[in-house]
Image: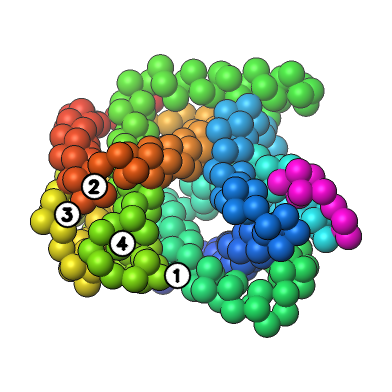
Amino acid sequence: MTTGAPVLPGYRAVLRVPGLRSVFVAHAVSMAGTLAAEVALSILIFQRTGSALLSALVLVCSFLPYALGGTVLSSIADRYPARRVLVCCDLVSAVCVAGMLVPGMPVLALLGLLLVTGVVSPVFQGARAASLSRLLDADTFPVGRSLLRTISQTTVLAGFGIGSVLVAAIGPTWLLAADVVSFLASAALIGLCTPATPPNAADGDKSVAAVVRASADGLKYVFKTAPLRRLILLSWAVPLFASVHDGLAVAYTAQTGAAVTAAGALFTGYATGTVLGELIVARLRPPLRRRLVLPLVLASQLPAIFFVAVPPLPVAVALVAVSGAGFAFNQGIDPLILTATGPNYRGRLFTVQTSGLMTVQGIGIALAGLAGTLVRPSLVLCAVGLLGTTAVVLLTRRALREPPQH
């Protein structure tokens, strides 16, 4: 054992683990392709139908399937070796996007194929998190998950803008073809360049009924284990309230008198804040990350209260960035979630967590948009900030009250 000052488990420490560079490169490649494809499919459907509603359904179909895949199929992440699950999910997604390239494919069929990719996505993310829990120790595991989130948010910052430029340059069909290539590249990187890990809970019965039963058992386990339930609810509550910025970005921009085209600054502000928060907290020692959980969850909610004063857009962007930085609280609770979860349930746990995270964000955005049609957006943001602050403080105190034991 080395003596001297302990090495900070930052991103470099994670990337030194054999095979993990390929995991993160594969994530970046498939994430970029997926975001660009959402832009391409929205434009393709609008070009064919002229319907703004059908075009908007692309984003709805990106959120909704998480609830299905994350509950009914979550046990797949535990019952099979993670590398095999990851490769199969990438290949299923590649086939679905390739199907979108068939000339004359009906719009409903296009949306159906998108739904299938959404169903397998939480299984993919759950299996990947479960494999990271085997390849990384308790200190570096939250940093590994932080790096995945950082890559995701950085890709969001670039993806939609680049996707729009590429659609204009090469057309939506070629961009969808590039997405097929991105999924195939991700599958190759994972299959050929990443270490194998055994299944968490191997079972001889591979029937669909057995998969569904085991998934239901995993869901029951998550919510019957009190310390784990508190931590998962906290991980959902923070983005549930913070997501209202996205739902009201355009309406709030209009309220300030700025051009609605400037609303993109609010989206990029949140993503930028998230990336900066993850980068800073990842360099801290584990005990400090744990102590920062409450300040960070407060940072995620309090800025919304100041919208009652209708700040100008540059100030609003700064407030949203602070809120995004608070999302780094996950680095403080990820080790607690890992400790509270039996090894046989980790794949299901992370799949359910991912599924719930996407679902509550979709609900938050939808409800915020509805409220913004009835009440001034600034007042909605303030009210949600007050409600969110109260809720996350209570949940944080309960979640951190006692060390979780599985």
Which secondary structure, mark 4?
helix
Which quarter of the rendered picture does the N terminus lie within? Answer: bottom left
Q: Name the residue carrying label 4.
A: 254
- In this rendering, is residue 141 above or below 356? below
The image shows residue 49 at horizontal and vertical percentages of 72, 55
Location of mark 2 (residue):
376
What quarter of the picture does the C terminus occupy?
top left
User: What secondary structure is found at the residue carrying circle 1?
Assistant: helix
Give how far apart the Cα atoms at labels 1 and 4 are: 22 Å
**Circle 4: residue type:** Ala
- Residue 292 is situated, as x and y percent measured from the top left of the image, at 18, 51
17 relative to 268 in the view: left or right: right
Q: Which one is in front, 316 or 197? A: 316
Pointer 2 or 3: first along the chain: 3
Tell me the distance, in whole angstroms, between the alpha carbons under discs 4 and 3.
14 Å
**Vertical side of 3 occupied by 145: above or below:** above
Question: Comparing marks 1 and 4, which lies closer to the viewer?
Answer: 4
Q: Amino acid at mark 3?
A: Phe
Badge 4 or badge 3: first in the primary sequence: 4
Per the model, the C-alpha gap separating discs 2 and 4 is 11 Å
Of 175 and 145, the residue lying toward us: 175
Q: Which element carries disc 2, helix, strand or loop?
A: loop
Which labelled disc corresponds to residue 307?
Answer: 3
**Mark 1 or mark 4: whose residue is earlier in sequence:** 1
Q: Residue at x 68, y 42 (%)?
A: 115
Residues in magenta, as a range: 102-111
Q: Name the residue rendered at 20%, 28% in the picture.
A: 398
Tell me if label 3 and label 1 are in contact, CB under 8 Å.
no
